[in-house]
Amino acid sequence: MLSFAILAILLIAGSVGVISLRQPVHAALSLVATLMTLAVVYISLEAHFLAAIQVIVYAGAIMVLFLFVIMLLNVADREDAKFAWMKPAAYIVGTLTAIGLVANILQNPMPALNSESINNILNGGSAEAVADVLFNQFVLAFQLVGVLLLTGIVGATSLVQHKALAVKHEEELANG
Amino acid sequence: MISTDYYIALSAIMFSIGTVGVLSRRSAIMVFLSIELMLNAANLAMVAFARAWASEGALNALNGQAAVFIILAIAAAEVAIGLGILVAIFRYRETTELDLLSELKL
Protein backbone atom coordinates (compact mmCIF):
# COMPACT_ATOMS: atom_id res chain seq x y z
CA MET A 1 0.00 0.00 0.00
CA LEU A 2 2.88 2.36 0.82
CA SER A 3 4.48 1.84 -2.59
CA PHE A 4 1.15 2.49 -4.29
CA ALA A 5 0.72 5.70 -2.28
CA ILE A 6 4.18 6.90 -3.33
CA LEU A 7 3.49 6.05 -6.98
CA ALA A 8 0.08 7.76 -6.88
CA ILE A 9 1.57 10.92 -5.36
CA LEU A 10 4.34 10.97 -8.00
CA LEU A 11 1.81 10.43 -10.81
CA ILE A 12 -0.53 13.19 -9.63
CA ALA A 13 2.34 15.60 -8.94
CA GLY A 14 3.76 14.91 -12.41
CA SER A 15 0.35 15.42 -14.03
CA VAL A 16 -0.20 18.70 -12.20
CA GLY A 17 3.27 19.75 -13.35
CA VAL A 18 2.32 19.04 -16.99
CA ILE A 19 -0.65 21.40 -16.87
CA SER A 20 0.77 24.11 -14.61
CA LEU A 21 4.43 24.63 -15.54
CA ARG A 22 4.96 27.75 -17.60
CA GLN A 23 7.83 26.59 -19.81
CA PRO A 24 6.78 23.96 -22.38
CA VAL A 25 10.08 22.10 -21.96
CA HIS A 26 9.52 21.78 -18.22
CA ALA A 27 5.99 20.54 -18.83
CA ALA A 28 7.26 17.97 -21.35
CA LEU A 29 9.92 16.73 -18.89
CA SER A 30 7.24 16.52 -16.21
CA LEU A 31 5.23 14.34 -18.61
CA VAL A 32 8.31 12.13 -19.08
CA ALA A 33 8.48 11.67 -15.30
CA THR A 34 4.75 10.86 -15.22
CA LEU A 35 5.09 8.27 -17.98
CA MET A 36 8.08 6.63 -16.25
CA THR A 37 6.07 6.40 -13.02
CA LEU A 38 3.19 4.94 -15.01
CA ALA A 39 5.56 2.24 -16.28
CA VAL A 40 6.27 1.30 -12.65
CA VAL A 41 2.52 1.22 -11.98
CA TYR A 42 2.15 -1.17 -14.95
CA ILE A 43 4.71 -3.48 -13.30
CA SER A 44 2.64 -3.45 -10.11
CA LEU A 45 -0.36 -4.41 -12.29
CA GLU A 46 1.38 -7.51 -13.72
CA ALA A 47 2.00 -5.93 -17.14
CA HIS A 48 5.77 -6.23 -17.49
CA PHE A 49 5.92 -6.12 -21.29
CA LEU A 50 3.75 -3.00 -21.40
CA ALA A 51 6.00 -1.35 -18.81
CA ALA A 52 9.03 -1.88 -21.06
CA ILE A 53 7.13 -0.63 -24.11
CA GLN A 54 5.91 2.39 -22.14
CA VAL A 55 9.48 3.41 -21.34
CA ILE A 56 10.87 2.69 -24.82
CA VAL A 57 8.07 4.03 -27.02
CA TYR A 58 6.34 6.67 -24.90
CA ALA A 59 9.00 8.11 -22.62
CA GLY A 60 11.66 7.48 -25.27
CA ALA A 61 10.43 8.02 -28.81
CA ILE A 62 7.25 10.08 -28.50
CA MET A 63 8.58 12.51 -25.90
CA VAL A 64 11.77 13.08 -27.92
CA LEU A 65 9.52 14.05 -30.84
CA PHE A 66 7.69 16.48 -28.55
CA LEU A 67 10.93 18.02 -27.28
CA PHE A 68 12.22 18.43 -30.84
CA VAL A 69 9.08 20.30 -31.91
CA ILE A 70 9.14 22.50 -28.77
CA MET A 71 12.76 23.31 -29.61
CA LEU A 72 11.84 24.16 -33.22
CA LEU A 73 8.76 26.25 -32.45
CA ASN A 74 10.01 28.12 -29.37
CA VAL A 75 6.50 28.43 -27.91
CA ALA A 76 5.70 30.12 -24.62
CA ASP A 77 2.34 30.60 -22.99
CA ARG A 78 1.19 34.19 -23.16
CA GLU A 79 -1.17 35.70 -20.62
CA ASP A 80 -3.79 38.12 -21.86
CA ALA A 81 -7.27 39.27 -20.97
CA LYS A 82 -9.03 37.33 -23.73
CA PHE A 83 -10.82 34.28 -22.25
CA ALA A 84 -9.29 35.01 -18.83
CA TRP A 85 -12.34 33.41 -17.17
CA MET A 86 -11.48 30.12 -18.91
CA LYS A 87 -8.67 29.14 -16.54
CA PRO A 88 -10.52 29.24 -13.18
CA ALA A 89 -13.56 27.68 -14.86
CA ALA A 90 -11.36 24.83 -16.18
CA TYR A 91 -9.89 24.19 -12.72
CA ILE A 92 -13.34 24.14 -11.11
CA VAL A 93 -14.73 21.77 -13.75
CA GLY A 94 -11.70 19.48 -13.42
CA THR A 95 -11.87 19.35 -9.63
CA LEU A 96 -15.60 18.63 -9.65
CA THR A 97 -15.11 15.89 -12.28
CA ALA A 98 -12.34 14.27 -10.27
CA ILE A 99 -14.33 14.38 -7.01
CA GLY A 100 -17.42 12.98 -8.70
CA LEU A 101 -15.59 10.16 -10.43
CA VAL A 102 -13.55 9.14 -7.38
CA ALA A 103 -16.61 9.24 -5.10
CA ASN A 104 -18.54 7.09 -7.56
CA ILE A 105 -15.69 4.58 -7.88
CA LEU A 106 -15.11 4.26 -4.13
CA GLN A 107 -18.85 3.88 -3.45
CA ASN A 108 -19.07 0.81 -5.70
CA PRO A 109 -16.12 -1.35 -4.61
CA MET A 110 -15.06 -4.19 -6.88
CA PRO A 111 -14.73 -7.77 -5.59
CA ALA A 112 -11.49 -8.78 -3.85
CA LEU A 113 -8.65 -9.99 -6.07
CA ASN A 114 -7.55 -13.60 -6.44
CA SER A 115 -3.77 -13.56 -6.97
CA GLU A 116 -3.54 -17.21 -8.05
CA SER A 117 -6.01 -16.68 -10.89
CA ILE A 118 -4.22 -13.48 -11.92
CA ASN A 119 -0.86 -15.26 -12.10
CA ASN A 120 -2.34 -18.12 -14.11
CA ILE A 121 -4.12 -16.00 -16.70
CA LEU A 122 -1.95 -12.91 -17.09
CA ASN A 123 1.29 -14.88 -16.77
CA GLY A 124 3.01 -11.72 -15.53
CA GLY A 125 2.06 -9.90 -18.73
CA SER A 126 5.24 -11.23 -20.36
CA ALA A 127 6.06 -10.56 -24.02
CA GLU A 128 5.14 -14.17 -24.80
CA ALA A 129 1.71 -13.89 -23.18
CA VAL A 130 0.86 -10.57 -24.84
CA ALA A 131 2.16 -11.74 -28.23
CA ASP A 132 -0.04 -14.82 -27.99
CA VAL A 133 -3.13 -12.60 -27.87
CA LEU A 134 -1.76 -9.99 -30.27
CA PHE A 135 -0.95 -12.44 -33.07
CA ASN A 136 -4.12 -14.48 -32.74
CA GLN A 137 -7.20 -12.44 -31.83
CA PHE A 138 -5.70 -9.01 -32.59
CA VAL A 139 -3.79 -9.87 -35.75
CA LEU A 140 -6.04 -7.75 -37.99
CA ALA A 141 -5.73 -4.74 -35.66
CA PHE A 142 -1.98 -5.33 -35.52
CA GLN A 143 -1.65 -5.19 -39.30
CA LEU A 144 -3.95 -2.18 -39.58
CA VAL A 145 -1.76 -0.38 -37.04
CA GLY A 146 1.17 -1.09 -39.34
CA VAL A 147 -0.72 0.57 -42.22
CA LEU A 148 -1.65 3.46 -39.93
CA LEU A 149 1.98 4.02 -38.93
CA LEU A 150 3.01 4.01 -42.59
CA THR A 151 0.30 6.57 -43.37
CA GLY A 152 1.50 8.60 -40.40
CA ILE A 153 5.08 8.62 -41.68
CA VAL A 154 3.98 9.67 -45.19
CA GLY A 155 1.62 12.34 -43.80
CA ALA A 156 4.15 13.82 -41.37
CA THR A 157 6.85 13.89 -44.06
CA SER A 158 4.61 15.57 -46.62
CA LEU A 159 3.42 18.15 -44.07
CA VAL A 160 6.94 19.14 -43.08
CA GLN A 161 8.72 18.67 -46.41
CA HIS A 162 7.04 21.63 -48.16
CA LYS A 163 9.30 24.30 -46.64
CA ALA A 164 12.45 22.23 -47.07
CA LEU A 165 11.86 22.06 -50.84
CA ALA A 166 11.21 25.83 -50.99
CA VAL A 167 14.43 26.55 -49.07
CA LYS A 168 16.40 24.31 -51.41
CA HIS A 169 14.88 26.11 -54.40
CA GLU A 170 15.83 29.51 -52.97
CA GLU A 171 19.38 28.35 -52.33
CA GLU A 172 19.66 27.14 -55.92
CA LEU A 173 18.42 30.53 -57.15
CA ALA A 174 20.89 32.35 -54.90
CA ASN A 175 23.78 30.25 -56.13
CA GLY A 176 22.79 30.97 -59.73
CA MET B 1 -2.83 -6.81 -3.45
CA ILE B 2 -4.10 -3.30 -3.97
CA SER B 3 -7.74 -3.17 -4.98
CA THR B 4 -8.63 -2.24 -8.55
CA ASP B 5 -10.72 0.66 -7.23
CA TYR B 6 -7.65 2.65 -6.23
CA TYR B 7 -6.07 2.26 -9.65
CA ILE B 8 -9.30 3.34 -11.37
CA ALA B 9 -9.56 6.33 -9.01
CA LEU B 10 -5.96 7.27 -9.84
CA SER B 11 -6.77 6.98 -13.53
CA ALA B 12 -9.86 9.18 -13.10
CA ILE B 13 -7.81 11.83 -11.29
CA MET B 14 -5.15 11.79 -14.03
CA PHE B 15 -7.85 12.08 -16.68
CA SER B 16 -9.43 15.05 -14.92
CA ILE B 17 -6.05 16.79 -14.65
CA GLY B 18 -5.59 16.21 -18.39
CA THR B 19 -9.03 17.75 -19.03
CA VAL B 20 -8.07 20.83 -17.04
CA GLY B 21 -4.92 21.13 -19.14
CA VAL B 22 -6.86 20.92 -22.41
CA LEU B 23 -9.30 23.58 -21.23
CA SER B 24 -6.90 26.02 -19.60
CA ARG B 25 -3.75 26.14 -21.74
CA ARG B 26 -3.51 28.36 -24.83
CA SER B 27 -0.53 26.97 -26.68
CA ALA B 28 -1.47 24.06 -28.95
CA ILE B 29 1.57 22.08 -27.86
CA MET B 30 0.52 22.23 -24.20
CA VAL B 31 -2.98 21.07 -25.15
CA PHE B 32 -1.35 18.20 -27.00
CA LEU B 33 0.70 17.23 -23.92
CA SER B 34 -2.50 17.23 -21.85
CA ILE B 35 -4.18 14.95 -24.40
CA GLU B 36 -1.26 12.52 -23.99
CA LEU B 37 -1.93 12.61 -20.25
CA MET B 38 -5.61 11.70 -20.80
CA LEU B 39 -4.62 8.89 -23.17
CA ASN B 40 -2.29 7.43 -20.56
CA ALA B 41 -4.96 7.67 -17.87
CA ALA B 42 -7.27 5.59 -20.08
CA ASN B 43 -4.47 3.06 -20.63
CA LEU B 44 -3.96 2.76 -16.88
CA ALA B 45 -7.66 2.01 -16.42
CA MET B 46 -7.51 -0.65 -19.12
CA VAL B 47 -4.50 -2.43 -17.56
CA ALA B 48 -6.17 -2.29 -14.13
CA PHE B 49 -9.38 -3.79 -15.52
CA ALA B 50 -7.38 -6.52 -17.29
CA ARG B 51 -6.05 -7.57 -13.89
CA ALA B 52 -9.51 -7.41 -12.30
CA TRP B 53 -10.86 -9.54 -15.12
CA ALA B 54 -8.08 -12.08 -14.72
CA SER B 55 -8.81 -12.41 -11.01
CA GLU B 56 -12.39 -13.36 -11.87
CA GLY B 57 -11.08 -16.13 -14.10
CA ALA B 58 -11.76 -14.68 -17.56
CA LEU B 59 -9.34 -16.46 -19.89
CA ASN B 60 -9.22 -13.56 -22.37
CA ALA B 61 -8.15 -10.99 -19.76
CA LEU B 62 -4.91 -10.34 -21.66
CA ASN B 63 -7.03 -8.61 -24.33
CA GLY B 64 -6.83 -5.48 -22.20
CA GLN B 65 -3.04 -5.43 -22.36
CA ALA B 66 -2.99 -6.17 -26.10
CA ALA B 67 -5.40 -3.27 -26.65
CA VAL B 68 -3.10 -0.97 -24.68
CA PHE B 69 -0.24 -2.04 -26.95
CA ILE B 70 -2.27 -1.06 -30.02
CA ILE B 71 -3.32 2.25 -28.43
CA LEU B 72 0.37 3.00 -27.85
CA ALA B 73 1.14 2.50 -31.54
CA ILE B 74 -1.83 4.68 -32.54
CA ALA B 75 -0.67 7.38 -30.11
CA ALA B 76 2.71 7.36 -31.83
CA ALA B 77 1.10 7.89 -35.25
CA GLU B 78 -1.19 10.58 -33.81
CA VAL B 79 1.74 12.48 -32.29
CA ALA B 80 3.71 12.36 -35.55
CA ILE B 81 0.78 13.74 -37.58
CA GLY B 82 -0.30 16.25 -34.93
CA LEU B 83 3.16 17.73 -34.50
CA GLY B 84 3.54 17.85 -38.29
CA ILE B 85 0.32 19.88 -38.50
CA LEU B 86 1.56 22.15 -35.69
CA VAL B 87 4.82 22.80 -37.54
CA ALA B 88 2.87 23.54 -40.75
CA ILE B 89 0.55 25.98 -38.91
CA PHE B 90 3.51 27.66 -37.25
CA ARG B 91 5.07 28.32 -40.66
CA TYR B 92 2.04 30.22 -41.95
CA ARG B 93 1.02 31.99 -38.76
CA GLU B 94 4.20 32.24 -36.63
CA THR B 95 2.10 31.15 -33.64
CA THR B 96 0.44 28.05 -32.23
CA GLU B 97 -1.90 29.87 -29.89
CA LEU B 98 -5.33 28.35 -30.21
CA ASP B 99 -7.23 31.62 -29.55
CA LEU B 100 -5.56 33.21 -32.57
CA LEU B 101 -6.16 30.34 -35.01
CA SER B 102 -9.66 31.21 -36.19
CA GLU B 103 -9.37 31.29 -39.99
CA LEU B 104 -12.24 28.88 -40.45
CA LYS B 105 -14.63 31.08 -38.47
CA LEU B 106 -17.17 32.84 -40.64
Image (cartoon, grey):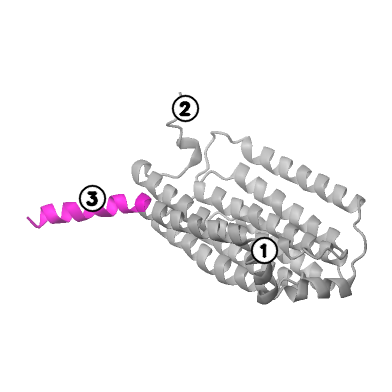
Please state which of residues A8 and A104 is positioned toward the viewer in this rendering: A104
Residue at the location (80% across, 55% down)?
B9
Q: Which residue is mark 3?
A: A166
Residue B41 location, quadrant: bottom right
Left or right of B46? Residue A149 is left
Q: Is residue A52 visible to us here?
A: yes
Element assignment for label 1:
helix
Q: Secondary structure at mark 3?
A: helix
Under mark 2, the amino acid is: Lys
Name the disc covering residue B66, or none.
1
Quadrant where the N terminus of chain B lies?
A: bottom right
- Is residue A77 visible to us here? no
> Which of these two is toward me, A102 or B74?
B74
Q: Is residue A70 left or right of residue B69?
A: left
* Disc 2: which residue: B105
Marks 3 and 2: CB-CB under 8 Å? no
Q: Chain of mark 1?
A: B
Q: Position of residue B31 (x, y in %)?
A: 56, 48
Distance Cα–Cα, label 1 vs label 2 = 41 Å
Say which quadrant the C terminus of chain B sits in: top left
